[in-house]
Amino acid sequence: MTGCSGFVGYYFIRLLAEEWTGVDVLGIDFNQPNLDFDVSSIHFQYKRVNMMQQEEVAEILREYRPDYIIHLAAFSSVGLSWQSPVECFHNNTNIILYMLEAQRKLGLTSRLLSVGSSEEYGNVNKDQVPLREDHVLDPVSPYAVARVSQEILSKVYVGGYGLDIVMTRSFNHIGPRQKPVFVISSFAKQVAAMKLQGLTRGELTAGNTDIIRDFLDVRDVVRAYMLILLKGQKGEVYNVCSGEGHSLKQIIKMLGDSAGIEISINIDEKLIRPKDNMIIVGSNTKLCEEVEWKQDISIAESLEDILSFYYGC
Amino acid sequence: MTGCSGFVGYYFIRLLAEEWTGVDVLGIDFNQPNLDFDVSSIHFQYKRVNMMQQEEVAEILREYRPDYIIHLAAFSSVGLSWQSPVECFHNNTNIILYMLEAQRKLGLTSRLLSVGSSEEYGNVNKDQVPLREDHVLDPVSPYAVARVSQEILSKVYVGGYGLDIVMTRSFNHIGPRQKPVFVISSFAKQVAAMKLQGLTRGELTAGNTDIIRDFLDVRDVVRAYMLILLKGQKGEVYNVCSGEGHSLKQIIKMLGDSAGIEISINIDEKLIRPKDNMIIVGSNTKLCEEVEWKQDISIAESLEDILSFYYGC
């Protein structure tokens, strides 16, 4: 598992530790993961690998020869990609290229899960959602370009070299422990702080709150990834999403209601991104039908859990 | 001009030297260009730059601050991209990223010409040609992926950062001096060698000779690039092609007829590429209408000139 110390990595390792006892898991990342549960059932090991170094990537695959590769390592912020497009491109596209190339050269038959993004679809109209996997890709941010490049590279490694890769276009995920650089976590953190101060009214600073996204709890996301890895069809791409859209305004209202705080929104122009997509909502029909995934955690439950997490911080 | 020492660079410098006297031209590449004409009219200078080094790219743009950037540097062989996908990706996608990023950070308003490829379209059916620029992109080789990535990156730098970029999807180009790693040049070299030996019959080794491509003489290509640079619309992509398809079999026949040699074809399975596109023919309507380009050199003329070049070697 690459990117094992990130937000999704934490929950994926937890899922493996709970449901896949007996497997051997090697986690790689820049930093050691911060795990607060027992990982002895999966013989979890951690190794520091700089995935930007092609030789380091090849070396770890040569040594470990995994049956499955869960590739979570990524530069995953659309907002930050506008400030650091090169870093974003290197940390998404180049790293998967190094991995696929190592697999090819070593002749590994490992199945690899490549995580992409709903941002790949670009600007769409209200009447085009929910987006299906066959919708045209039209990336409008450096992050989206990096993800499209990752996906088309993966497809060539399947079609041209016969590698076994399954892919996702993952929509926004949320959940406890997500860094507050991500929008919902940032909102929840601010609302939780108000609650802890005993406020009943508060002001929240935000960018464009009319944008609509498809949010899915990270625990549902990792279950989807596991099912795609086990049952997905080689070379295929699966939307990972709830199928429902919520505006940031609605989310703020839900957080306020849950905390019992009346929130007013203060728009900060600096937080409005160039060329942001207005609406992104996916269809999860392919995911549900082909790998038998089903959403477990509603958005309301997820938001409650995120607030509870911040209440405890 | 990046990639100034390549096949297209040679002809572009010649065009500038003939028709753009008084301009200052800085050519950059790994190796000094081999120019056999007078370049004093364009104050041509050469500088060795390793475009894989982001800092070197930034430094040259900071020093020179060009009005126009003609970006020809590329890893441009589909065949070799299957053997060296990482090198291909770095030498197409990463280098343009470094250039665009330097322009953005320096606030340069230079207009940049980004050269892409007809390979971006991928496998198409006979009834879909000639391909127009709005045809869906479906890259099936590492080279094609690198070019699509280059194009979508360029579009984000136009749309998100306001850079002035014009793009091409260039179909196969041919002409004297093209390296024999490219198919037509390889055929012509073999036919010319037979002629020089005084043969009237000969055998030529080839891969799949049923594939159909749209070949355009390099001298028409560089005139198109110049017109796109001067008259093209910011953020737009232009097919650069003849609009006509010829199979490799037909080209071999034309070369043989021109040389007075009866050629039989020996198919070498090793030369057949995985997942090769069967037919690629473009529409040049946009190019002709928007920048007023017109083809000057027919394929027959072009093949004659290539043979003559090899007769003289």
Image (cartoon, coloured by chain):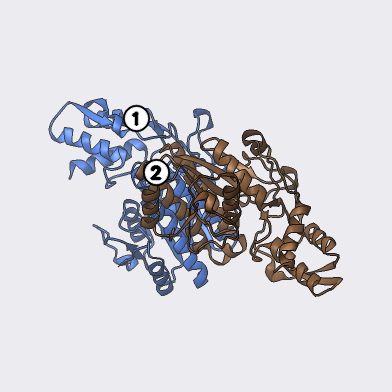
Chain colours: A brown, B blue
Residue A295 in sight from this viewpoint: yes
State the residue at coordinates (63%, 41%): A135
Q: Tell me the amino acid under the disc marked 1.
A: Asn
Across and down, in percent, residue B88 comes to 38, 50
Q: Is residue B194 above or below residue B64?
A: above
Q: Earlier in the sequence, mark 2 or mark 1?
A: 1
Packing grade of label 2 (10 A; few <14, some 14-19, many >=20) is few
The residues tagged by marks 2 and 1 sit, at their Cα atoms, a distance apart of: 29 Å
State which mark lies toward you, 2 or 1: 1
Snapshot quadrant of residue A179: bottom right
Chain at numbered mark 1 = B
- Horizontal relation, residue A95 to residue A182: left or right: left
Q: Give the residue at mark 1.
A: B208
Q: Tell me the amino acid under the disc marked 2.
A: Asp
Residue A138 in sight from this viewpoint: no
Q: Quadrant of the C terminus of chain A?
A: bottom right
Packing grade of label 1 (10 A; few <14, some 14-19, many >=20) is some
State the residue at coordinates (73%, 71%): A268
Tag shown at residue B296: 2
State the residue at coordinates (71%, 63%): A309
Chain at numbered mark 2 = B
State the residue at coordinates (60%, 52%): A14
Q: Is residue A99 above or below residue A178?
A: above
Across and down, in percent, residue B157 comes to 55, 60
Snapshot quadrant of residue B54: bottom left
- Horizontal relation, residue A64 to residue A42: left or right: left
Judged from the image, the secondary structure of the residue bearing numbered disc 1 is: loop
Judged from the image, the secondary structure of the residue bearing numbered disc 2 is: loop
Q: Is residue B22 above or below residue B290?
A: below
Across and down, in percent, residue A280 comes to 69, 50
Across and down, in percent, residue A156 comes to 45, 41
